[in-house]
Amino acid sequence: MAVLGLSFIGMVETLYLSLSRNVGPVPCHITNGCGDVLTSVYSEIGGIPISWLGFVFYITAFGVTVFDIFGGANTFRFLRWPSTVAFTISTMLTGIQAFVIQQYCEYCLTSAALSTIICVLVWTGSQSISESSILTANAENKTNGKKI
């Protein structure tokens, strides 16, 4: 459930950035560098704003987690590589903010934190409590003669 909540927050944030990007300056309340970061040459890959790529990652994480929780399928493992890519890109972009642009965007930093936490949760298998993990653990314990 933690990945579900984190990915929902990430979807909302990246959708906000993607839609606000061309409307005018994005208000920055903490870091005051959002405009510089979001309009830099590093804010796009092949003409596509990175915030849209983040949105695709978060909606994928959200969908896969929903399927894992409610579908009973073991789909959570499919998030390992996408979350690793998101973490790696976030780390590189945070470095670019720090050492190249020398400005920070609070939304970008929040997204980097979200993708890092999601990556850790996915790789450790700690999506929190889901019905599929409870059912799997219950089935394994019953086959070993153990009771929960």
Image: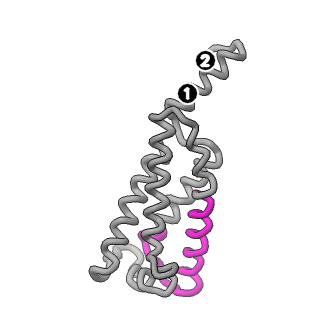
Q: CA distance from mark 1 to mark 2?
A: 10 Å
Q: Position of residue 116 (x, y in %)?
A: 57, 59
- Residue in the foreground of this view, choosing between 137 and 108: 137
The kind of residue tagged 1 is Ile
Q: Secondary structure at mark 1?
A: helix
Numbered badge on residue 134: 1
Q: Are marks 1 and 2 in contact (CB under 8 Å)?
A: no
Crowd around label 1: few <14 · some 14–19 · many ≥20 (10 Å): few
Q: Position of residue 71 (x, y in %)?
A: 47, 34
Numbered badge on residue 148: 2
In the image, taking residue 109 as reference, residue 146 lies left or right, namely right
Q: Position of residue 140 (x, y in %)?
A: 66, 22
Asked if the magenta segment contains residue 89, the reply would be yes
Residue segment shown in magenta: 83-109
The kind of residue tagged 2 is Ile
- Tell me the quarter of the picture where residue 33 sits: bottom left
